[in-house]
Image (spheres, grey):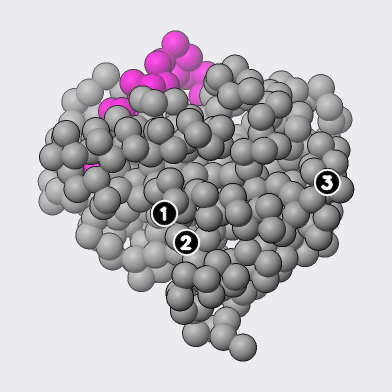
Amino acid sequence: MKFGVGLPTGMEGLINPIPFFEPRQFLEAAKLAEQLGYDSVWGNDHYAPQNYVRREYAAVPNFYEVLSVLAGVAAVTERVEIGTSVLVLPMRDIVTLARQTATIDQLSAGRLLLGVGIGAYPEEFHAARPDLAGGRRGEMLDEGLELLNRLLTEPTVTHHGKYYQVESLDMAPKGCADPVRVLVGGHQLRGIDRAIRHGSGWIPGWRPFDELAEWIATLRERAADAGRDPHALTVAPQLSCLIGRHHKSTERRYLDSGMVQHRKSLAFDGRDPAKSLHNNLIGGYAEVYDRVERLAAMGADHLACLTFCVDTVDDWFEQLELFATEVIRPYRRAHGIAEPAATRR
């Protein structure tokens, strides 16, 4: 099991207050995460305030461009993988994205994990890309993934599709990793099929743990049926996190956090917000550790982009250290996993 922390690149208003991180704190957080033994550092991708955020706040949230932040993270770290969870692919020009992806992978010596998805909020798409109003985002995601993978692997690409066009395009460099690792996000079962067709892994959002275990088994079965090595696909769920010494008081603290309203705003995707408390990493140290063990047993490989449910920057950094001390290190000791050299005491 690998452990990754999410930088709040696009979390203002949704989960964290406005304002939240200053730009320098993204780099400070990434360096500290590496020192504490995290395996990866991630950012998320938003473009415009969501309808419920507009109603809640008069201020406009700061949404930092995720690939730019990760380029900075790559420059101040040496070991941690850097990822997007997830980049909203239908919002992007695919040729520009391929060049950015290959460049960051080269600059980071192959550490990039490019998580892509459809995007949770249609209103962002309508605000930032009205030129594509009427486009089907699922179709754009499928076609964009196909073209992106071709640009990252083939010497010359011609593509005449419904949404994207290139003609005899030569692109170099490719990524340092061969190919660049692309993970597909999705809260529905069709995300599994996209991951098998186009990706090297799958990033599901939280689901009830019993359901998530079934979906991981389905991923492995469908991958084998498609002729892929089922264990070569990384399963990297993205979960909320809030831990503390006392289980019940930590749960109450979560219920007062901005994450609760965020979960309610996403209820359209079939997940019951009332179940989020017990199907994320929320609670006392022992309870959260037990959930990590359960996730590992069901086949999760990498906890991607842990999202801390806090209201202050100081609390965010405290959670970063607590999770490393109370969960990551005990887990590694229990499983005989050596800590990265930089974290050995």
Single out the mark in the foreground, 3 or 1. Answer: 3
Which quarter of the figure has residue 272?
A: top right
How crowded pointer 1 is (Cα within 10 Å; few <14, some 14-19, many 20+) is rated as some
Mark sitting on residue 2: 2
Q: Closer to the camera, 42 or 333?
A: 333
Residue 98 vs residue 165, the one in the foreground: 98
Q: Across the whole image, how many numbered discs are drawn on residues?
A: 3
Kind of residue sitting beneath label 3: Lys
Question: What range is drawn magenta here?
Answer: 128-150
Of the pair 249 and 67, the residue shown nearer to us: 249
Give above or below for 152 relative to 184. below
Report the predominant secondary structure element of the magenta stretch.
helix
Q: Would residue 137 be counted in the magenta stretch? A: yes
Question: Seen from this angle, which residue lies furthest top?
Answer: 134
Answer above or below: position of 267 versus 193. above
Question: With respect to residue 60, does 73 lie above or below?
Answer: below
* Residue 152 image point, x, y percent: 24, 50
Q: Is residue 293 visible?
A: yes
Q: Position of residue 135 (x, y in %)?
A: 41, 15
Q: Which mark is residue 301?
A: 1
- The residue labelled by disc 3 is 248
Which of discs 3 and 2 lies nearer the camera? The answer is: 3
What label does residue 9 carry, if any? none
- The three-letter code of the residue at mark 2 reads Lys
Along the polypeptide, which appears first: circle 1 or circle 2? 2
Give the Cα distance between marks 3 and 1.
Answer: 28 Å
Residue drawn 36% across the image and 70% down it:
109
Q: Secondary structure at mark 1?
A: loop
Say whether residue 8 is visible.
no
Residues tagged 1 and 2 counted as in contact (Cβ below 8 A): yes
